[in-house]
Image: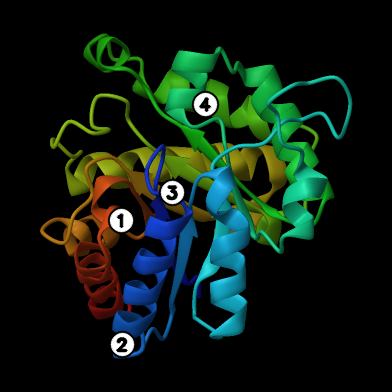
């Protein structure tokens, strides 16, 4: 049975001092929860990773460390980039790959997403491949076609036993940061379609084990309903992960759903 993953993407927020306070608060609140089948991860900015790693390891907090992006290059003249081997040395477990903001603002295309996912997995980390359609694509009825193209491109050529090294996050662009989340039915339909693509590419066993997340204006008010879909295995949380209380409220809903 798959465990749930509740991952907080801090985006361009929290310096390392603010990260100390947030992780401290989050650790205290998590100590009062029986996480059971729920895993918690945070994805701070690069400048916070070492700070968060030290706190998590030093206090033995039930939090997995994630990064928001990395280069598919391992080394070289790529000013401003961070490589997968660098992240692995910091005990990073998860790396977001192809987040919609990376695709839209930094021209990260399907080929680079694929190369980056391979780089992350090669270094022993879990690639959280992000896929999703724009509002225009949704209105034109292209959601399933977009998801199939993005997923198939990202995972092509990966080994069949990659289930423990891969997570796919469905994040419809029209829902991210807008306050308007997809319905539970939207999330389930998209995740079901994604699982079918994984099955046709990597096989039934892998498709049944890979965790699929929903991301886009997730909150404690809609978390339980979103997670109730049989193919929705967790949430990629944005703004609500920037405060320990609101993030833990979502985690509590996940615990209630996964009892």
Question: Contact, CB < 8 Å: mark 4 with mark 1?
Answer: no
Q: Quadrant of residue 17?
A: bottom left
Alpha carbon separation for disc pair 4 and 1:
29 Å
**Can I make out residue 65 in this image?**
yes
Question: Contact, CB < 8 Å: mark 4 with mark 3?
Answer: no
Question: Contact, CB < 8 Å: mark 4 with mark 2?
Answer: no
In the image, residue 31 above or below residue 109: below
Q: Which residue is mark 3?
A: 15
Circle 3 SS class? loop
Q: Is residue 49 left or right of residue 73?
A: left
Residue drawn at (57%, 46%) of the image: 47
Q: Which residue is mark 1?
A: 241
Q: Is residue 55 left or right of residue 172?
A: right
Alpha carbon separation for disc pair 2 and 3:
27 Å
Query: Residue 191, image x and y in percent?
Result: 40, 44
Depth check, front residue: 163 or 234: 234
Circle 4 SS class? helix
Q: Is residue 222 left or right of residue 89?
A: left
In the image, residue 94 above or below residue 32: above
Q: Which residue is mark 2?
A: 33
Marks 4 and 3: which is nearer the front?
A: 3
Query: Looking at the image, is mark 4 or mark 1 earlier in the sequence?
Result: 4
Circle 1 SS class? helix
Residue drawn at (33%, 84%) of the image: 28
Query: Looking at the image, is mark 4 or mark 3 earlier in the sequence?
Result: 3
Query: Looking at the image, is mark 1 or mark 3 earlier in the sequence?
Result: 3
Query: Looking at the image, is mark 1 or mark 2 earlier in the sequence?
Result: 2
- Local packing at callout 4 (Cα closer than 10 Å; few below 14, some 14-19, many 20+) is many
Mark seen at residue 148: 4
Alpha carbon separation for disc pair 1 and 2:
17 Å
């Amino acid at each position: 049975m798959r465990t749930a993953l509740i991952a907080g993407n801090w985006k361009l927020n929290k310096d390392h001092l603010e990260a100390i306070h947030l992780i401290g608060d989050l650790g205290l609140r998590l100590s009062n929860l029986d996480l059971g089948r729920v895993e918690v991860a945070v994805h701070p900015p690069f400048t916070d990773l070492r700070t968060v790693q030290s706190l998590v390891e030093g206090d033995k907090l039930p939090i997995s460390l994630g990064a928001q992006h990395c280069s598919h290059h391992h080394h070289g003249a790529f000013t401003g980039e961070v490589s997968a081997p660098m992240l692995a040395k910091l005990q990073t477990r998860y790396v977001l790959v192809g987040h919609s903001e990376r695709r839209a603002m930094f021209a990260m295309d399907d080929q680079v997403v694929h190369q980056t996912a391979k780089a992350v997995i090669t270094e022993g980390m879990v690639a959280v491949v992000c896929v999703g359609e724009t509002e225009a694509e949704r209105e034109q009825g292209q959601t399933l076609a977009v998801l199939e193209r993005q997923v198939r491109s990202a995972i092509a050529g990966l080994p069949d036993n990659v289930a423990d090294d891969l997570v796919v996050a469905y994040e419809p662009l029209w829902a991210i940061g807008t306050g308007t989340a997809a319905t539970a039915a939207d999330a389930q339909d998209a995740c079901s379609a994604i699982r079918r693509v994984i099955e046709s590419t990597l096989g039934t066993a892998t498709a049944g084990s890979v965790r699929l997340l929903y991301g886009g204006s997730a909150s404690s008010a809609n978390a339980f309903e979103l997670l109730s879909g049989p193919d929705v295995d967790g949430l990629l949380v944005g703004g609500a992960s920037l405060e320990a209380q609101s993030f833990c409220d979502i985690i509590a809903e996940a615990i209630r759903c996964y009892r």
